[in-house]
Image: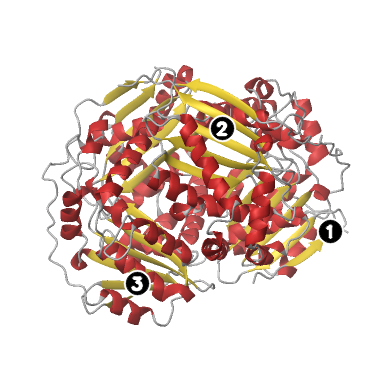
Amino acid sequence: MSILVRKQPPVYPVEKLIIPEARLFRLSSGVPVYMIEAGTEEIMRLEFTFRAGQVNENLPLLASTTNMMLTEGSVNYTSEELNRLIDLYGAFLNLSAEKDRAGIVVFFLNKHIEKVLKLCHEIMFCPVFPEDELNSLMKKRLHWFLVNREKVPNIATDQFFESVFGKHHPYGHQLDEHVFEGLNPSLLKEFHSKFYTTDSLAIIVSGKIHEKTTELLNNFFGEITSGKSHFETSGNSLEGETGKKVHISKPGAVQTAVRIGSSTINKRHPDYIGLKILDTVLGGYFGSRLMKNIREEKGYTYGINSCVSSLELSGYKLISTEVNRKNLTKTIDEIYKEIMLLQKYPIDKEEIIVVQNYMSGEMVRMFDGPFALAESFRSAWDFGLDNTYFYRLAEKIKTIDPDEITELARSYYNIDDLYEITVGLK
Amino acid sequence: MINYNRFCLDNGLRILVHEDRSSPLVAMNILYDVGSKDEDPDKTGLAHLFEHLMFGGSLNIPEYDKSLQMVGGENNAFTNNDFTNYYLTIPSHNIETGFWLESDRMLELEFSRKNLDIQKNVVIEEFNQRYLNQPYGDTILKLRPLAYEVHPYRWPTIGMDISHIENTDLDQIRTFFFSHYAPNNAIIAFSGNITPDLALSLSRKWFGPIEKRSLKPREIPVEPEQKAERILTVEKEVPATAIYKVWHIGSRISPDFYTLDLITDLLAGGESGRFYTELVREKKLFSEINAYLTSDIDPGLIFVQGKLMKGIDIQQAEEGITRVIRGVQNGNGIKDEMEKVKNKFESSTVFANTSILNKAINLSFFELLGNPELINSEVEEYRKVNQEMVIEATRKNFVASNCSTLYYKSIREEK
């Protein structure tokens, strides 16, 4: 037998990305339904998403509380019954209220489809917001808030959004203990009737789609009529705070949390896909510049990463880490150093190939299976984009030029524009 | 139904393959049968530190991560009390790189001092981040030594003390590698776009030449039966008082494991669980409360943990827990709830198995338990549990003398 030579087997480029298209149909009420057929198991994922996010609220916590109260009592069931039924049908129901949108995502075995859809209708369109349940929810939320306020990463992230988007805008406002007493059932009812409407609803269906899905969706959601949504946003403009450096002291903290970043373009901007690639080089994967330098070469931290993210009205880029205070200054200096290196020198051939190949693999993972497909679909759909966005991204990953990355680093990472938040000991 | 093939190479390496053509990827999972229970009491945290070192370069490959990223792959790893687990997903046409990477680090690591020093720091920061820098983060550091007197489950995977990590030297690392990392101490499972034939031939090519090693025999002291209730109180500046209670149970393969699993689901399976319904929703004693099994391979624990609402007396809260458990012991209304938790278990299993990675991890774990077929039969085992079994297991396990309690009292000054 010949001796094995232990060198890397041939590396094949990722095959051409093929993303299953979502099929659109409309309920008789006009609600768009996007159907993505995928997977081998008899299961489905349904997402109901409304324009009912934080950006629509004029009081702190209103959007998230309205969303969380959907399963706390309806016209026909108490909160206890609703929760028992969800479990009895073996369904997983996630409530979510994000900055721009809110809704529910439900996962279930196809055999339970009819019962699950009926229940979803009850939850989304017949909530009664009982006062007792609201009071205990607010007490619990206050507890969770107090626990989270002990964690330096949470404090730092909250402060980052305030600094970047302004303390009066729903993207940026921070909570304090008093806001947990400011809500009552009629405020929630009003928010619900304004924003949980059919003209603000979209449905995303994925999985091995049950043959009766269209018929059942029409039965349960085809006839609903509701008033037009009033899409007023809070009226406050997005405006970053003036102080770029904020330190919040947290005596006794074992590590100091660091958040560095600023607002930026979102997915609608043509440069965004290039920025995604730049971000990956900087801190977006395990082999990134920040991770290599600050964790793998210096051992200052358990983890450091960066991200760029899109919002309806803006976008942001953010570098996050937690470090021992004795390495705090050195860490921050290294972060800026890495940004400047990207602005100064084009990245070399070998590194760009690693990033290209890593990101191409990541794109395969983004469309692997019914759940990933639905999430990726929504991440583009939210911005009025479709699969051409992903094809453009895939193409850019293959063809990006080192000078283009340098150029993007110069245009989008002006160090003087970056906010620097530290929480813990200095 | 998850179909799989099982092979064993001459050097003792076990291989399981589940082909799933619906995915463009292959998940590869490598489990080494070594965990923190295999450590010396004065050198704890070594198994987990070692997991970090596995990424620092091997005999022929200086940079593991870079080589994997080069083929569009992604990876991670975790260590627990029982085993150390490495996993990666790769676009299927590049899967051979996975074999190259994993066989090289099974063959031999680079053992660099610089890498050891850096990863010690990284692990110390991990210790700080997870266990010290957040409220209640040190709970596990206090509870394990309370519940276990002699079994190595008495220390957490991160280690008993930071000094153990600081004092690790290269010789210990080398010895650890050759006494635990070996084909005859590993299980590899593949799931996704790969045929059993290809998986076997590539395994033979890359792992076949690695010789069997003589392993350090496992000599783990048996935890004696707990005879009396144990209580520990700590006072800390945390926002709310918390209670943690643990009871000893049997091993992962003991016959009542599924019964106990079902009991924790009755108690705390989601918002319709008994704890939530009675103690959060109705009596408003807790802001959150949970129950679960540790799923350790050796005899493990049932955990019940809850955070109290403001102004609630700790004794009153604890009586609430006892009352709910007594309700199950008396069999009150259990029958109606059984169907619910069984349906939920079935769907969680089906959902977990939609991921090729989960399937690969589960196949390896069940092979470690000695029965890979559990990947298909667990739902049936769980469905078999009946009311009598629930009552019997609750009465047997939830007894005061078998219990350790940690009162985590808030000494925050009221505003």
Label 2 sits on residue: A296
Residue B97 figure quarter: bottom right
The disc placed on residue B257 is none
The quarter of the picture where the N terminus of chain B appears is bottom right
| Front residue of B131 and B46 | B131
Q: Nearer the viewer, mark 2 or mark 1?
A: 1
Label 1 sits on residue: B9
Residue, x 19% and y 30% (percent of image)? A241
Residue B160 figure quarter: top right
Q: Are marks 3 and 1 on the same chain?
A: no
Task: Measuring from the top left, give residue B41's x and y in whole percent.
Answer: 75, 26
Q: Mark 2 lies on which chain?
A: A
- The local crowd at label 2, few if under 14, some if 14 to 19, many if 20 or more residues have their Cα within 10 Å, is many
Give the CA separation, mark 2 to mark 1: 35 Å
Label 3 sits on residue: A118
| Front residue of A3 and B292 | B292
Amino acid beneath label 1 = Leu
- The local crowd at label 3, few if under 14, some if 14 to 19, many if 20 or more residues have their Cα within 10 Å, is some
Question: Is label 2 in contact with label 1 (beta carbons under 8 Å)?
Answer: no
Does residue A243 appear anywhere in the picture? yes
At mark 1, the secondary structure is: loop
Give the CA separation, mark 3 to mark 1: 53 Å
Q: Do labels 3 and 2 share a chain?
A: yes
Q: Which chain carries label 1?
A: B
Amino acid beneath label 3 = Lys
- Asked if residue B232 is positioned above or below residue A23 in the image, the reply reads above
Q: Nearer the viewer, mark 3 or mark 1?
A: 3
The quarter of the picture where the C terminus of chain B appears is top left
| Front residue of B251 and A256 | B251
Q: Nearer the viewer, mark 3 or mark 2?
A: 3
